[in-house]
Amino acid sequence: MPILTLTELKVLMQIPATDATLDPLLETLLPSAQERVVRYCNSAFLASGVQVYGVGISFTAPTTGPAGPGTIVDSGGRFLEAGFSDGCDVKVRGSALNDGIYTVKTAAAGTLTLELAVRTEAEAAGKFVVLSRLRWPKGLGIPFSVLLRYLVEKSGKLVSQETLPGGYAVIYKSEAEVMKLFNEYRRPL
């Protein structure tokens, strides 16, 4: 499960559920925002003991165009046994082309089918790859929604400070200020 689903994010950002105007932008920003949180907090948020690794892991590129779902395949068929499930987030490490965080749409013994918006590159088995399930702390939701609001509102805005006649001033928060909201989850470097 991602830090927040699109539905949860829209509730926290006070966007009506029926308003789909920002949905494509939010769905695009979600994975990279999660990566930012992981890097900033210096924590992979790995679920203890939920891991599959070895040289028998391969990746397929989307088969239904660039927006189709990619898959991760384990020749040993260990995903369900290890604790992967529908809707979970996984972190891939050690691959040549596909390191990162992915949301699983459906999990089967030997195949993880990823969410439609998640793109993987075709990669044959052979490298030592580690897949770990992520477990996001519940408290990450609110600071994460603030980060997404920042990213949405800052898209296209490069002004950091503006002063108008009459003493009116506008100063946009910096990304560094927004990221400080995650300090309680941050591990020392």
Image (cartoon, rainbow, N blue to C red):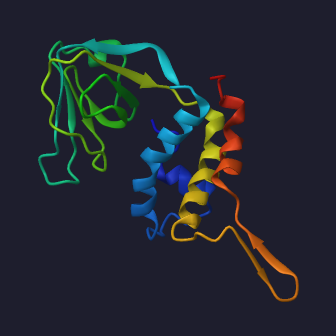
- Of residues 110 and 92, the one nearer the viewer is 92
Residue under the image location 48 percent in, 70 percent down = 19
Task: Using the image, determine if residue 140 lies above or below residue 153.
Answer: above
Q: Quadrant of the C terminus?
A: top right
> Residue 175, how many percent across, how many down?
63, 52
User: Which corner quadrant holds the N terminus?
Assistant: top left
- Which residue is at the front of the view, 44 or 164? 164
Q: Is residue 38 left or right of residue 83?
A: right
Q: Nearer the viewer, residue 80 or 71?
A: 71
Q: Is residue 171 left or right of residue 117?
A: right
Is 34 drawn above or below residue 125 in the view shown?
Answer: below
Residue under the point 88% across and 82% down? 167
In the picture as drawn, the residue positioned furthest to the right comes out as 167
Q: Residue furthest bottom?
A: 165
Q: Hey, which quadrant is residue 127 in on the image?
A: top left
Is residue 106 toward the left or the right of residue 134 in the image?
left
Q: Position of residue 28 (x, y in %)?
A: 40, 55
Instruction: Give the total of numbered labels.
Output: 0
Where does the image place residue 152, in percent across and percent down from the top left? Answer: 54, 63
Residue 45 point in image, percent of width and height: 53, 25
- In the figure, residue 180 lies in which quadrant? top right
**Location of residue 31 by image quarter:** top left
Give the residue at x 20% y 39%: 121
